[in-house]
Amino acid sequence: MNLPAPVGTLTGKGTTVVNLREAMAVLGRPLEHLARFMAWQVPSPPPERTSVVIYPTYVTVSASLTPDAPQKLLVAYIENCLRCPACKSLGRGQDGTCTQCNVQTPDPVPPEVWSQVAEVLE
């Protein structure tokens, strides 16, 4: 699978990341799900929570990420949300059912994280 590499640039107290929409198009998944995963995985000092804003051509994360963090987050997303824990294929569908072995597993991203993601339509 040839995915475009996500590239992060520090901007003030956050990070702007490009190429995520293109990578998710190759994976056949909505960018919103990856954004939820990122909000869940990127730590913030308490009591703050990491927020992610989706723009048409980039994503902003309310945390300073290292240059390799966007790529690591994408790989972690693939392993946690696309790879079937039963048969290890990348066939896990959006409903959690694997297209290869038909095993259904719950989404690892907690539903309450959704409030930490916003989309801006320009």
Image (cartoon, helix red, strand yellow):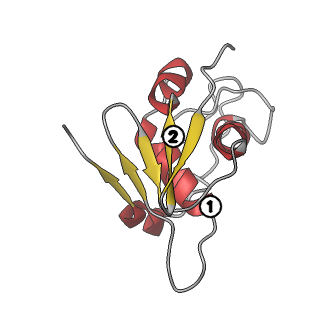
Rate crowding at label 2 as few (under 14), some (14 to 19) or many (20 or more) other CA atoms within 10 Å.
many
* Secondary structure type for disc 1: loop
Q: Percent x, y for residue 103? A: 68, 38
Separation of marks 1 and 2 at Cα, in angstroms: 14 Å
Q: In this view, does 121 lie to the left or right of 90?
A: left
Residue closest to the eye, 59 or 25: 59
Q: Is residue 94 left or right of residue 78?
A: left
Q: Which residue is drawn at 52% across and 59% down?
A: 39
Disc 2 target residue: 17
- Where is residue 118, by image quadrant? bottom left
Task: Indicate the quadrant containing the N terminus: top left, top right, bottom left or bottom right.
Answer: top right
Q: Percent x, y for residue 53? A: 37, 52
Which label belongs to residue 96?
none
Q: Which residue is drawn at 69% across and 50% down?
A: 66
* Secondary structure type for disc 2: strand
Q: Residue at x 76, y 27 (%)?
A: 89
Viewer-nearest of discs 1 and 2: 2
Q: Please identify the residue farthest to the front as the structure is shown.
A: 12
Disc 1 target residue: 42
Q: Is residue 42 above or below residue 46?
A: above
